[in-house]
Image (spheres, rainbow, N blue to C red):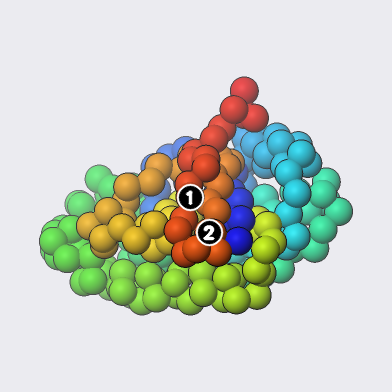
Amino acid sequence: MLRLLLARHGETDWNAQGRYQGQSDVPLSAAGRGQAELLALRLMGEKFDALYASDLERAWQTARIIAEKAGVEVKPEPRLRELNFGVLEGLTFDEAQARHPEAIAAWLEDYNQPPPNGEPLEAFSSRVLSLLESLQKDHPGQSVLLVAHGGPLGELLRLALGLPPERRWAFAMDNASLSELVLGDDGFPFLKRLNDTRHLG
């Protein structure tokens, strides 16, 4: 059995402004650091054997705050990075539509036609699947905490639960939320928690 605790990073200024962040290295805002502190306090009551985090600043900062309270080491994991949105990063959806209407239209019609310099969803899904397979191989019978972004955490859930690609955006995860997935030895997954934010008050 493998137990995965999935934590989304705290809020950034770009989150608050509704901007595409992707792989832009945006730090936590003051509000986001506060959320990370509350998440860290919540996780002090959880047992986990390993902690992996996206190496992007907002997730790494969140994980470091958790690690300091839990007394564990954070391991950087680039496969946990958010989807790369290419030229859309830093823009709101309205700004993206105004500046790159053709790219937005093509992308919304087929997510494997990413915006210029962006990441195809097939490549994104492949790296998340590679991570999931590595975790199952390296941590049998353990609990692992992943601190990352809504995109890869949602995709990990979709893949583990065997949902089709069109359900890719089916999981809402708020900033500093906690979710929990158990992968049983019988091969059947069990989603125990999703988007739990009660620690944020």
Give coordinates of residue 22: x percent, y percent. Answer: 44, 60
**Residue 152 visible in the shown view:** no
**Above or below, comparing residue 181 to residue 82 in the picture:** above
Which is more toward the observer, 201 or 101? 201
Residue type (three-letter) at the residue carrying disc 1: Phe
Left or right, 42 with respect to 147, comes to right
- Looking at the rendered image, the quarter that the N terminus falls into is bottom right
* Front-lying residue, 171 or 186: 186
Question: What residue appears at the point 39 percent right and 63 percent down from the top-left corner?
Answer: 159
Image quadrant occupied by the C terminus: top right
Please tell me how crowded label 2 is: few (under 14), some (14-19), or many (20+) other residues with Cα within 10 Å. some
Q: Which element carries disc 2, helix, strand or loop?
A: strand
Please tell me which of labels 2 and 1 falls first in the chain: 2
Left or right of 193 in this view: 40: right
Tell me, yes or no, whether the two marked residues, 2 and 1, touch with CB atoms within 8 Å. Answer: yes
Distance between mark 2 and mark 1 Cα atoms: 6 Å
Q: Is residue 31 left or right of residue 149?
A: right
**Which numbered circle lies on residue 183?**
2
Residue 121 x/y as whole percent: 31, 69
Residue in view at x 39 percent, y 57 percent: 161
Query: Residue 44, located in which quarter of the rendered image?
Result: top right
Toward the right, the furthest residue is 71
- Which amino acid type is marked by label 2? Leu
Q: Residues within 10 Å of mark 1 (few under 14, many from 20)?
A: some
- Vertical placement of 108 versus 116: above or below? above
Q: Quadrant of residue 124?
A: bottom left
Residue 89, picture quadrant: bottom left
Tell me the residue that label 1 is attached to.
Answer: 190
Q: Is residue 115 above or below residue 155?
A: below
* Residue 142 seen from this side: yes
Whole-percent x, y for residue 199 in the image: 64, 30
Residue 84 point in image, percent of width and height? 40, 67
